Image (cartoon, rainbow, N blue to C red):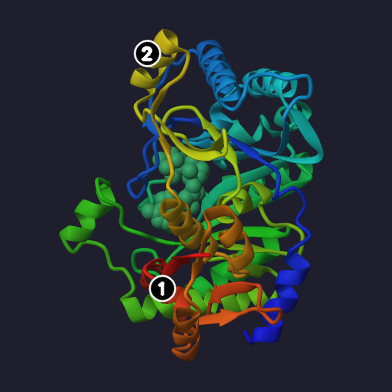
Amino acid sequence: MNKIGKDAINQAHNNAGNDHLPGLYVHWPYCVSKCPYCDFNSHVRQVFDERQYVEAICSEIDYLISLQGGRTDSKPLLGSIFFGGGTPSLMQPQTVGALLDFIRSRFSLALDVEITLEANPSSVEAARFAALGEVGINRVSLGVQALHDEALKVLGRAHGVEEALAAIAIAQQSFARSSFDLIYGRHGQQLAQWREELKRGIDLSNGHLSLYQLTIEEGTQYKNLYDRGELNLPSDDRSVRFFEETRKICDAAGLYAYEISNYAAPGQQSRHNLVYWRYGTYMGVGPGAHGRIEQGGNRLATAAIRSPKRWMGQVLELGHGFESMDKLSRGEMADETLLMGLRLTQGIDLASLRTLCGLGVRPQKIDELVSAGLCEMSANDEFLRASDRGICVLNQIVGQLSSALEPV
Ligand SMILES: C[S@@+](CC[C@H](N)C(=O)[O-])C[C@H]1O[C@@H](n2cnc3c(N)ncnc32)[C@H](O)[C@@H]1O
Ligand code: SF4
């Protein structure tokens, strides 16, 4: 895509809504089964006490409010809420309702607040969608992963294509906005097959798709299979082809890449995820959740205990399950801004980097990366972004920019 094209798309994408307001992330750590490729903080457990979970989450939210200055006459404003997992669609709708009632008692929700819940496309969960819509969920993100039964088996998924199609249809009836995830670059997958699958996915979609290239994560069953040579995955060069084709096909269909793995029609981006990528403020509660909050002019990185059992134990004892709460230095904030922001097609706002961190990138380094064809400046010279070529070597670019930071 050329430079003018990207600027026009960013312009259209800019009016997503509340992505400048703080967000709240709530982690639900359980799944029906563990998928062999997944390293998310998700655990298989048949019985859990949802009432106790609600109480623990409420207690953590109150703890974070007290850390940020306590309750005042005016409630703090939230632009987005995200129930992630694990598989939060396993929660009873009344559990989600109880959490949302509590959140409304503590925060003012923006008029167009985005309230997303991640869901697995099984029939049991799809049957709950209408009730989840009634308690306030207005966006769902479905983990479809593949549109072939054989591929779903290899991915160890607990659902088939029929169920996924039914769940997509029910989600689109039940929620104002919906998205689904597909994984590509899978075992044995050919580019021609992916093109067809992606086009089918686009036809089924409703303004947003998350398209993840399969990654092999430490500690997963896939890692063992991969190490034993039992997974047939695309080479690095082929992976780049998969990525480029994915962008091209989505672009032609009006679903623009606004982030490495996320594609949306204008205005349909995930506002909550934009808060992360634009390095905004967000609270994270529940086992393993991360947050970035403001306290007395400082930015704190919070991380909760990953193990649900140990997390619950500490919440019962101390009122929260956080295991670290670190004040970030200006350099750390700048590194995080670069790491998150360069994932966006829009790139990073250089003025915000200077204001937030008191640091800027040495102009010679920017010129060097632009001359090498790895970065581009937006037409108004406000945003620095990775080029189509640069996006494939993002870590390298982040490293170079980070080592060229200087006080402003
Ligand atoms: C927390 S999970 C989604 C929710 C839900 N539990 C599900 O699986 O349907 C987030 C998404 O990350 C993606 N994902 C997880 N592990 C991945 C991996 N190793 N490679 C690529 N994508 C992955 C999947 O598409 C998944 O839907
Ligand atoms: S991919 Fe989703 S369903 Fe599978 S283990 Fe991970 S969080 Fe659970």
Decide which of tag 2 and tag 1 comes sooner along the chain. Answer: 2
Q: Position of residue 103 (x, y in %)?
A: 68, 23
Q: Which amino acid lies under the numbered mark 1 shown in the image of this protein?
A: Ile
Q: Is residue 320 left or right of residue 4?
A: left
Q: Residues within 10 Å of mark 1 (few under 14, many from 20)?
A: many
Q: Secondary structure at mark 1?
A: helix
Q: Is residue 10 above or below residue 17?
A: below
Q: Is residue 141 above or below residue 389?
A: above
Asked whether residue 191 appears in the rendered view, the answer is: no
Among the 4 quarters of the image, the one containing residue 84? top right
Give the residue at mark 2.
Answer: 313
Residue nearest the viewer, comparing 126 with 96? 96
Residue that extends furthest to the right in the rendered view of this protein: 111
Q: Which amino acid lies under the numbered mark 2 shown in the image of this protein?
A: Gly
Q: Residues within 10 Å of mark 2 (few under 14, many from 20)?
A: some
Task: Say which residue appears at 59% left-offset and 67% top-offset.
Answer: 350
Give the label on residue 397, or none.
Answer: 1
Q: Secondary structure at mark 2?
A: helix
Asked whether residue 68 appears in the rendered view, the answer is: yes
Structural distance between the alpha carbons of marks 2 and 1: 42 Å
Q: Is residue 174 above or below residue 30?
A: below
Give the label on residue 108, or none.
Answer: none
Task: Say which residue appears at 22% left-offset and 59% top-offset.
Answer: 226
